[in-house]
Image (cartoon, coloured by chain):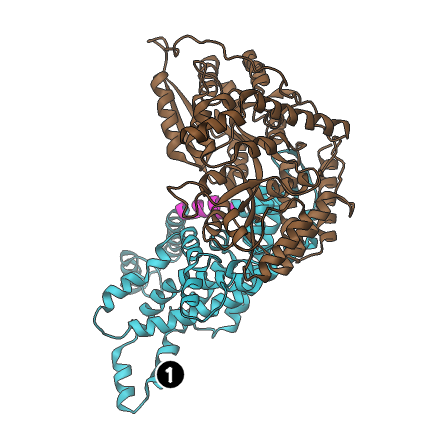
Chain colours: A brown, B cyan
Amino acid sequence: MDEKQSALFNRQIKRRDFLKGMAGAGAALGIAGLAGCAPPAPETPPPAEPVAPEPKPEEPKPPEEAAPISLDFTVWSYSVETILDNIQKFQDIYPNVTVNLTDYSWTAFRETMVNRFTTNTPTDITYSGGDWLPEWAKAGWLVPLEDYFPEAADYKPKIVGYALKDMTYNGKLYGLPYYADITSFLYNEEVMKANGIEKPAETWEELEDQLGFLKDAGMTTPMVLEFAQANPTTLENFTAMVFGRGGEFFNENFDVLFKDEASAAWKQLEWLAAQYSKGTIDLLPHETDVVKALNTGQHVYTVLYNYNLAELNNVATSPLAGQFKLALMPGATHETYGFAKFYSLTKMAVDRGADVLDACWKFLEYFGGEVGGEYPIAKRWAVEKGLGFGQLPLYDDPDVQASFAQWIDPMMLKQQAGLARGRNQTVWYGIWSEFMRIQLLRGATGEISVAAAMEEAANKAEELKATFA
Amino acid sequence: MIAGMGDDARPLHQMDEMNTMKTEHTPSVAARHAPKAKRFSIRTRNLRAGLWMITPTAILVIIFTFYPYFYAIYGSLQTLSPLLPTKFVGLLNYKLVAESSYFITAATNTFTFTIIVVPLVVLIGLAVASLLNQKFFGDVALRGILLLPWAIPTAISGVIWKGMFANSWGAVNVALYSLGIIERYVPWLTTTGLAMGAIAVAHVWTQFPMATVLLLAAIQSIPDEIYESAAIDGASTWQRFRFITLPNIRGMLVVVTLYSLLIALTAYDITYGLTGGGPGTSTTLISYFTWAETFRMLNYGRGAALAVMVALTSLVLILLLLRAMPRDALLEE
């Protein structure tokens, strides 16, 4: 980043600005709460000054006679070489701790972990997500960090609102962030303008007009989406679209809100079905397919996890780097979905005793928390991979700021992140989400009507609510 | 049968004793009864030996075949989930599965997929086996190379074929467009009918090599003299194939067809890797539905019910196929 760019970034995105943005996210949650859509008991980050990182002594050294400890750590297969390197760095600091890494496909992670838990396959620390947390916590597979490490609660004020919401169950913190991000509305500015469109759509109706215009101009499918029944991200993408309209799937009592034709979810599925039938959107199985497709220059729009923009604008890997931009999620409120993926502690680790527990906390702090006044791993993910972060102090980090400015408009990111919110989750949400994805695909592709898809999804939610009552 | 025992399954020394007794014409009651008692003993010993010999295999079959099968049947009658208490529900799981529109879609897709791929695998396998039965330069190397698609893990094959059929950047579209055959890229993987065709092509590509190898082995076991005498009698190439090759490999054809049928009915990886079951659910096969119901929705009971239904359907199809085949076809192999 050159000096001019750096100065612009620093002027645009001071720490206080970011905190205001995050406070906005908290306020959004508060408003949602007033509307009857608030989460059970999440805490929002403080709107004022951040808690200054406490000065820490030099990196702790284990006593020489410390007994060797082995930890089993499970992740989904994203940048495993970076994870292994992070583990090596951790082991260099704590030579008595050995971390055994096992990675599984993202698309099969939940069911694999459920089987791992039910068969008592040794697992101490695992990646987790907000939609699985209630299920795994209720089953007793994951435990609240606060119950074993009271100091974990100190992190709450330092975590962005939607990330904290995802990591909280029954008012307790169950993890520290691996990363926290938003789902974004992205577009290829150059291709868009070359086809006679000056600015990205702000509403779904406007987007429909633009897609039709682009199709008529000869573009096969102007919009590509990561949308497949086997991919958990499908529902996240749909959620972001629904949030853009200001909608929600369930209220705080987990009553279904999408049975009504006027509901945001219903309207959004109708929109998708209409676009699919017109051939203006393509539904691809995975984000990597979408990124590849966008790099052909044959598409303009998509909705993806925000970190994909870093990949799209990476000059080293993307032939069209620099052409892709972030716009606010179309819809009345422009809200979007914010989430966290996090490191969580298992009951199996607790059962192994105090020494293992102590090693786990060291691991959790090193990977998701603060070490020597820094957040080394979260920062690394942000700088090297463009992953969002849940740790508020990282918004002030000059390295992170410089890195992000290379691939995203910081002001737009701030604006969209301020409008991001988490989802209401419950113990059966994971199961329902699997079912819902199928209905979304069937409805969007016209296999069944939107009404039938919504009815089936609603019936399933009600059945699960009754079953788990 | 041990030499010298004839129909009377008795050891030689007993036969000698009996002969001696017959010669002396003094067969005592005890002597008349003794051989009978020993014959029973030998049968018992044979039985015991047989039992000992099959015991290891039987144990493995019981543990790895019968137990899972009966546990699946038991599970299909329960509410089985890691998140809920187990409860007997009778045939409810079967009812809910059968009523599910998703099941009907998946079953229809599986049937369509099977109907398309099984004949193709067998016919292409037969054609390539006939070709490879000829002597030509590089034929041995070609036989080895031919097995590669089958040896590649199916999930990897899915990725390879995604590179071929991908809508925006796939080799097929690029080639067709470059040749001027299409004006716009064809969305092979995201158009309902085309996606099924794409997974069928990919599946056949992975499966026909095995069929080829099996059929080639059968073809090569036919004595050359038969072909030679037929050629002398003036039989054409087609007639030799029709009246010599086909009748002699029909047993293997049954085996290959059954094998292809079972592989198609349980196909999973290629679909998962190539289309993820989409667009919509148009390439969702019953195996994916079973997996999703079991592990994604954590409903092991309903998944078990599905598995039992698939197993029974497969069994019925196999029996129908066997019935349709010549009775002695399998015996020949």
At x 47%, y 43%, the residue is B63
Please state if A255 lies on the left or on the right of A354 as rendered: right
Q: Which residues are magenta?
A: B56-67
Where residue A286 appears, as percent x and y from the top left, is: 51, 47
Task: Work out whether B197 lies above or below A147.
Answer: below
Task: Work out whether A455 lies above or below B139.
Answer: above
At x 47%, y 22%, the residue is A397
Please name whichever residue, A455 or B299, is drawn nearer the observer in this view of the structure: A455
Tag 1 subunit: B
Disc 1 secondary structure class: helix
Please name whichever residue, A380 or B35, is drawn nearer the observer in this view of the structure: A380
Residue B33's quadrant in the figure? bottom left
Please state if A300 lies on the left or on the right of A454 as rendered: left
Q: Is residue A239 visible?
A: yes
- What secondary structure is the magenta-colored segment mainly? helix
Where residue A16 appears, as percent x and y from the top left, is: 57, 20
Reading the image, the residue beneath label 1 is B243
Where residue B238 appears, as percent x and y from the top left, is: 36, 84
Please name whichever residue, B295 or B215, is drawn nearer the observer in this view of the structure: B295
